[in-house]
Image (tube, rainbow, N blue to C red):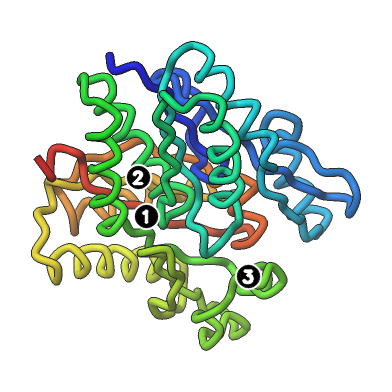
Amino acid sequence: MSLFQIFSDGAADIPSKVAKQYHISIIPFYVCLDQKTYQKEIVELPLTVFYQKMIEENIFPKTSLPPVQDYVDSFTSALQQGKDIICFTITDTLSGSFQSAMTAKQILQEQYPERKIYIENSWAATGSQYLLVREAARMQQAGYDIDAVHSYIEKAKIDSRIFFMVGTLKHLEKGGRIGKVAALSGSILNIKPLIVLGNGEINKAGIARSRKKAMIKLSELTKEYIEQNHFCVSDFIVTIGTTNTPEEPEIFSEILKTYLPTMEWIEPFQIGATIATHTGPMTLGVCINKKFEAYL
């Protein structure tokens, strides 16, 4: 196995069992629920508590990116073991996590000039970032070196996408992340705003009049994206993420499979506090990414 350590910030929502399986180190974001106390997501603030506060008590959380020192502390241990580093962050259009990690790199490269430190701006978030990290880990286990992984990421992040729906737009509005989706109307009864994240940008993707119709439309959008770009469906892996509707991924996956029957499926995951703070509850999305073999 190539001697390098894979890191990701907490925005990737990598399930803990996957992180353990692939030896991925997570650097969490901080979440505030009481306007004063910030806690590390999952490490200090369980998602059960987060969603209970957000939904039942109607609290609008706040997030804070991992500070430079958190990156420095995390990277130092690996560097002292003689390992190179590759670290994935949420797209820099949604957070300053990338810049925080870059600053840590600049500090540490003076102390460890012989080591390689790649900071990867994933142009993604949550499940699509997760799939990029997972593919990097698969490459590592297959014996590829860190330069090959970096080369893969530079290509794959361009093709990665998330198509998702939110319950309402109020969390995006409060978090200042609404940008180009502002024209979508989520206030009309039963209207579900549909959004796409690609190349680091959030854009509107349409509306649907029920959650079932939204799942169908998201499936259509995913298929259209692949076909319009003349991609091969079997080159992709896909996963479904949800905030607080654990019953929906199974329903959604059955719909998606009718549109994309040859795509490789990864177990659904729960969207974490970092992302849910801005999308709100009732968020559901499909995340797709090309396998590293597609670029060989």
The local secondary structure at tag 2 comes to strand
Give the number of the mark in front: 3 or 2. Answer: 3
Please say whether residue 18 is visible from this viewpoint: no
What residue sits 51% from the left and 59% below the top?
92
Name the residue tied to disc 3.
Answer: 172
Marks 2 & 1, CB-CB < 8 Å contact: yes
Q: Amino acid at mark 1?
A: Val
| Residue 51 image position (x, y, % from top left) | 70, 47
Instruction: Give the Cα distance between marks 3 and 1.
Output: 19 Å
Q: Residues within 10 Å of mark 3 (few under 14, many from 20)?
A: some
> Image quarter for residue 136?
top left
Q: Earlier in the sequence, mark 2 or mark 1?
A: 2
Q: Amino acid at mark 2?
A: Thr
Q: Label 2, label 1: how many angstroms apart (C-alpha)?
A: 6 Å
Disc 3 element: helix
Percent across and percent down for residue 86 are: 41, 33
The residue indicated by pointer 2 is: 239
Earlier along the polypeptide chain: callout 3 or callout 2? Answer: 3
For the residue pair 250 and 263, the one nearer the viewer reads as 263
The dot on residue 286 is: 1
Q: Position of residue 186 (x, y in %)?
A: 58, 80
Q: Is residue 11 visible?
A: yes
Mark 1 or mark 3, which is nearer the start of the sequence?
A: 3
Q: Residue at x 47, y 52 (%)?
A: 125
User: Is residue 72 shown left or right of residue 238?
Assistant: right
Decide if residue 219 is on the left or right side of residue 60: left
Which three-letter amino acid code belongs to the residue tagged 3?
Leu
Q: Residue 120 versus residue 45: which sits nearer the camera?
A: 120
